[in-house]
Amino acid sequence: MMISYLLLIASVLLGTLIVSFFQPKKQMVRLLLSFSGAYLLATTITHLLPEVYQSCSLNSDGQYIGAFILAGILLQSILESFSKGAEHGHIHLHSHSEDFPWLLFVSLSIHAFSEGIPLSYEQESNLLWAICIHKVPIGIVLATFLLNSNLKKRNGYLFVILFALMSPFGALLSQKLTFFIDYHKEITAITIGVLLHVSTIILFESTENHKFNYSKFISILIGIGIALIA
């Protein structure tokens, strides 16, 4: 699991380094978001979702898993009212403020924490790579906002580092705490709802003037294709 923790942290820091040294164009970030969203959605549907239902196949509680997935979708909707869509590449906040954006930090931390919970139960590396790939463009968007705001640079970097630690922290606690072990199916189902909400928003949000975007469509196909053959 230590390698998984390091990969999760490195993916966010990689996004920050990309911003610091290359200042990527918005179009490239959007294509990377589309690819990562497609990869994340395909992995959630083909790996994580069947695994949760399979673990419930011999128990009567399987019928309630759908309710927990819906709860995850609702939870992510609430979180986005505070994060302003940072999970899928959009931050609409007043960057002139010098105050630490606590609402943004807490909502993103809860989202990242939930992403780490299933990793301790997922036997394959598909979900880990899906989350890591997703975190690179999110790290780019987050670092772009923080470093271009009036926040002190050290506070901006502190924000990024703490955010990078949240998913490993979720994976660690899900292995150590009895609550997460006893209710891991239900909690993982909530995480599935969170991931479904985020990934579908990335994939299906309208493009400018509602025009068909060939580049975005191709990046989505590549993301789904890699997830299916991985």
Image: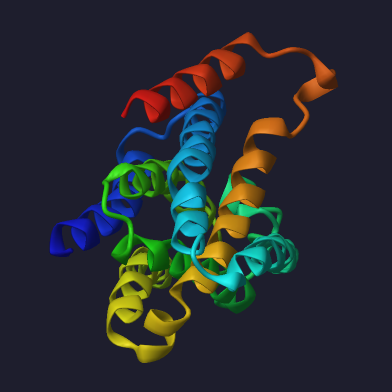
Task: Give the camera-side residue of 111 and 40.
Answer: 40
Residue drawn 70% across the image and 59% down it: 73
Q: Can I make out residue 150 in this image?
A: no
x, y (%) of residue 90?
64, 47
Q: Residue furthest front?
A: 58
Residue drawn 78% across the image and 23% down it: 208
User: As drawn, is 140 to the left or to the right of 230?
Assistant: right
Q: Residue furthest left?
A: 2
x, y (%) of residue 53?
52, 56
Residue drawn 60% across the image and 58% down it: 194
Using the image, determine if residue 227 lies above or below residue 170: above
Task: Give the camera-side residue of 61 and 96.
Answer: 61
Q: Residue furthest bottom?
A: 178
Is the image coloured rainbow, by chain, by secondary structure, or in one colour?
Answer: rainbow
Q: Can I make out residue 29 in this image?
A: yes
x, y (%) of residue 22?
34, 33
x, y (%) of residue 126?
33, 42
Task: Give the camera-side residue of 31 and 77.
Answer: 77
Residue drawn 85% across the image and 20% down it: 209
Using the image, determine if residue 217 lies above or below residue 103: above
User: As drawn, is 18 to the left or to the right of 38?
Assistant: left
Count of residue discs: 0
Task: Give the camera-side residue of 84 and 218.
Answer: 218
Q: Residue furthest right?
A: 209
**Quadrant assignment, res 130:** top left
User: As drawn, is 48 to the left or to the right of 132?
Assistant: right
Using the image, determine if residue 29 lies above or below residue 149: above
